[in-house]
Amino acid sequence: MQTYKVRVTKDYLVFCSAHFIFFDDDKCERLHGHNYKVTAELEAPLDEDHLVFDFIVLKKLLREIVNELDHRMLVPMKSRQLRIEESEKEIRLSYGEKQWVFPSGDCICLPIENTTAELMAKWIAERLRADIDRTAKRRFDGVIRMEVEESTGQSAVFELPARPPA
């Protein structure tokens, strides 16, 4: 069976967000930000229209995802190190002696353990597949590769494997 790939990397598939990461179980970076760039690659056999996936739909779905992340504080809701208190108006984060308080509307709460580029790539890939399933004319069962670039020359790639057809 022949397999094809389509790849989308556009100037508007970017988001500017603040975050910090935890490492070595006892260290926390300073709060800082990145101008992230997202690149998606879909791999599958051609469909009945001779497409891997419609570029127009793919760009639209990716743009919606990055727009949700843009100009937000990234909050890793599954973090083991971070204490998170949510209220209607604010999100309070605590790590040891450090504390941060952000307006709720300035945050995006993500179901991940740490806001690394690797886990961001995984979350975006899974979110893209779910959005395709929810909105596209057909399920996409092929491979999804997601690249999240934190800065020029520094990126992480996650591959979401193909799944059996429904």
Image (cartoon, grey):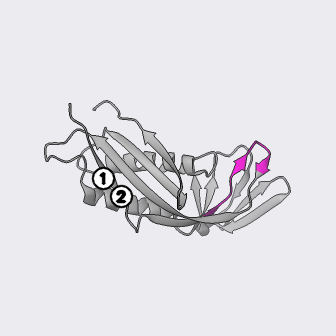
> Dots 2 and 1: beta carbons under 8 Å?
yes
Q: Measured from the top left, where is residue 149 in percent x and y?
A: 51, 57
Residue 142: x %, y % from top left: 31, 39
Q: How many marks?
A: 2
Which residue is the extreme one toward the right?
97
- Mark 2 or mark 1: name the one nearer the start of the chain: 2
Name the residue that disc number 2 marks: 61
The quarter of the image holding the N terminus is: top left
The x and y percentages for residue 102 are 68, 67
**Which region of the structure is painted magenta?**
18-27
Question: Which type of secondary structure does the marked residue at label 2 adopt?
Answer: helix
Disc 1 residue type? Thr
In the orientation shown, which residue stands out farthest toward the front? 153
Q: Give the image quarter of residue 160.
A: top left
Q: Kindly identify the residue that appears in the image at 78 percent across and 49 percent down.
A: 27
Q: Residue 103: percent from the left, percent from the top? A: 66, 69
Task: Identify the residue under disc 1.
Answer: 135
Instruction: Identify the mark at residue 127; answer none if there is no mark.
Output: none
Element assignment for label 1: helix
Q: Is residue 118 above or below residue 60?
A: above
Amino acid under disc 2: Leu
